[in-house]
Image (cartoon, grey):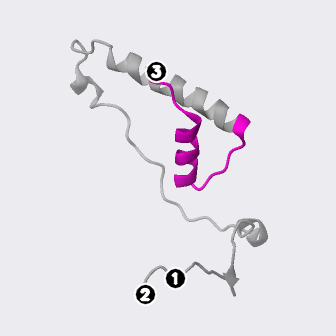
Amino acid sequence: MEKVSIDEVKYIAKLSKLRFTEEEALKMASEFEAILTHFKTIDNMDLSDVDLNAFDEVNTELRKDVPEVFEDKKKLMQNVKSLRGTAIEVPKIIE
């Protein structure tokens, strides 16, 4: 298995708009390697005897979409960067 480098972790972090210290990046590299090793193990499993149609009866019911009133507006808007009145103001993305 190829080793995940600190530079790769920093690149992924940059794409994700995250920042890591050197220690955190080293830990993340180790965790990425463990995940990739797990996928490699799964890839090597023989699943030819698994019947994929046996999973058609799995419960796929979603929760009911019931509107709820959220009373604590301050808590609801605590992570909003900019408000205009009672609306969330977002950056313009279309010219």
Cα distance, mark 2 to mark 1? 8 Å
User: How far across and how far down the image is residue 57, in percent?
Assistant: 30, 31
Q: Which region is colored magenta?
A: 1-23
Of the 4 image quadrants, the one containing the N terminus is top left
Secondary structure beneath dot 2 equals loop
Relative to 39, say whether 81 is above or below: below
Residue neighbourhood size for the residue with mark 3, other residues' Cα within 10 Å, grouped as few (<14), some (14–19), many (≥20): few
Cα distance, mark 3 to mark 1? 42 Å
Cα distance, mark 2 to mark 3? 45 Å
Relative to 90, say whether 29 is above or below: above
Residue neighbourhood size for the residue with mark 1, other residues' Cα within 10 Å, grouped as few (<14), some (14–19), many (≥20): few
Q: Amino acid at mark 3?
A: His
Q: Amino acid at mark 2?
A: Glu
Is residue 13 rendered magenta in the image?
Answer: yes
Which residue is tagged 2?
95
Secondary structure beneath dot 1 equals loop
Q: Residue at x 56, y 65 (%)?
A: 67
User: If you read the primary sequence from the N terminus, does the residue marked by circle 2 or circle 3 appear first?
Assistant: 3
Residue 16 appears left or right of 76? left
The quarter holding residue 81 reads: bottom right
Q: Are marks 2 and 1 in contact (CB under 8 Å)?
A: yes
Q: Amino acid at mark 1?
A: Lys
Relative to 71, say whether 1 is above or below: above
User: How far across and how far down the image is residue 86, in percent?
Assistant: 68, 83
Is residue 10 rendered magenta in the image?
Answer: yes
User: How far across and how far down the image is residue 60, in percent?
Assistant: 37, 40
Q: Which mark is residue 92?
A: 1
Residue 43 appears left or right of 33? left
Which residue is tagged 3?
38
Q: Are marks 3 and 1 in contact (CB under 8 Å)?
A: no
The quarter holding residue 10 reads: top right
